[in-house]
Image (cartoon, helix red, strand yellow):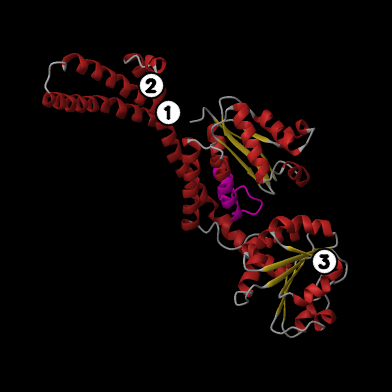
Amino acid sequence: MPNKFKAISLSHKTAPVQIREHISLTEEEIRRILQKAKDFFSLSDALILSTCNRTEVYYGHELDLSTEIIKLIGLEKGVTDVVNYLNYFEVLNEDNQAIEHLFRVSMGLEAQVIGDIQISNQVKRAYQAAADLDMAGPFLHRLMHTIFFTNKRVVQETAFRDGAASLSYATVELIESLTVNTFEPRILLIGVGEIGEDVAKNMVHLPQAKVKITNRTYSKAEEIAAPLGFEVVPFENALEAMKEADVIVSSIMKNEPFITKELVKSFDIQSYKLFIDLSVPRSIETTVEDVPGAILYNVDNIRSKTSAALDKRLGAIPAVETIIEESIAEFFNWKKEMMVSPTINKLKQSLEQIRQEEISRYLKNADPKEQVLIEKITKSMMQKIIKIPVIQLKAACQRDQAEEMIEILTDLFDLEKITTEK
């Protein structure tokens, strides 16, 4: 179990997007940093979470290693002036602060979009990476499984995860509901600015869809599409791609509409064609809906849906925080009992040593039946003798007096020698 659980956090609350982009870590970079932290600092419990909105490191150690870990991140990212970024990191050096922060992040309370459903999967992947490198000991295993159980309670007992509260996720939900009867719907995303990029990342929740991306800057589209496995269409071929698509999502900056009614009339719409305009000012003429088979949704349609969902989630926050408090209290009770576990084991070893010495002294001339009986009696006696100190130790944990009780038992049974003689 770590001496102290700590956290360092760079997030949308402490740093602008330009800084977050520099520090954001890939899965491979996370693995390399974890391995270096293990080799350099002998960390046995560590977890790194990196998303578009945050890069955080949780670890167990007696010392504050925040600066050293930030330097490791800088080394991995090739950021030579990473010391200038120190003020963007929030450092949490107290157990209760770091643990509560991880709970709040994992539930989506600290997300840009409150109740973000993606964060729970991102936390699970971060935990898996730590476990794969043997950097999750009993403490971190118990903590993470408590968090997963808490997340389950939040979903089952509150409205915190109900509805789509982000524009991009609401867009994907809308596409999913309107293409439910379409086999492998063909989706074209035009423009990968901030909103377009977020929509692209959320498209992974439509595994059956055939997604294509087009953008004025081809390299930007390629950069976003490649890790997601999407096809890139050169911007000059956008018209042909629009004709083929079942769904067109437009997120481009233009002073006049990019998709007009006249243009849509030239499409041979066999069944339907869904247009979603996420641009401000709008990039799709509202009159395209006059064309048979054309269905248009704009930012206002989708935002009204997200606002209702967000209000519902905000109303559920007190209930979520109560569930978190209960889970943290339960976890700290376990943590306190873990603190006395080494003392209980030493006490058992001490009593077993006495029992073995006395048996070997007096059973030399006993027959096999007597030996079996005496073995049984002495073991039973030992279990009864140790029962009271164990109960008292666990009770002392609940009273926050475990350290005093450990000291008394250590002196009384001379348990220090058990460690040195091992």
Seen from the viewer's position, the closer of residues 206 and 410 is 206
Name the secondary structure under disc 1: helix
Drawn side of residue 297 relative to residue 324, left or right? right
Disc on res. 406: 2
Q: Does the magenta stretch include residue 105?
A: yes
Between marks 2 and 3, how big is the CA–CA gap?
Answer: 69 Å
Q: Which amino acid does label 2 sit on?
A: Ile
Q: Is residue 267 above or below residue 155?
A: below
Which stretch appears magenta?
A: 103-126
The answer to which of marks 2 and 3 sits earlier in the sequence is 3
Mark 2 vs mark 3, foreground winner is 2
Name the secondary structure under disc 3: loop
Quarter of the image with the C terminus in it: top left
Tag 3–tag 1 contact (CB < 8 Å)? no
Mark 3 vs mark 1, foreground winner is 1
Residue under label 3: 281
Residue under label 1: 339
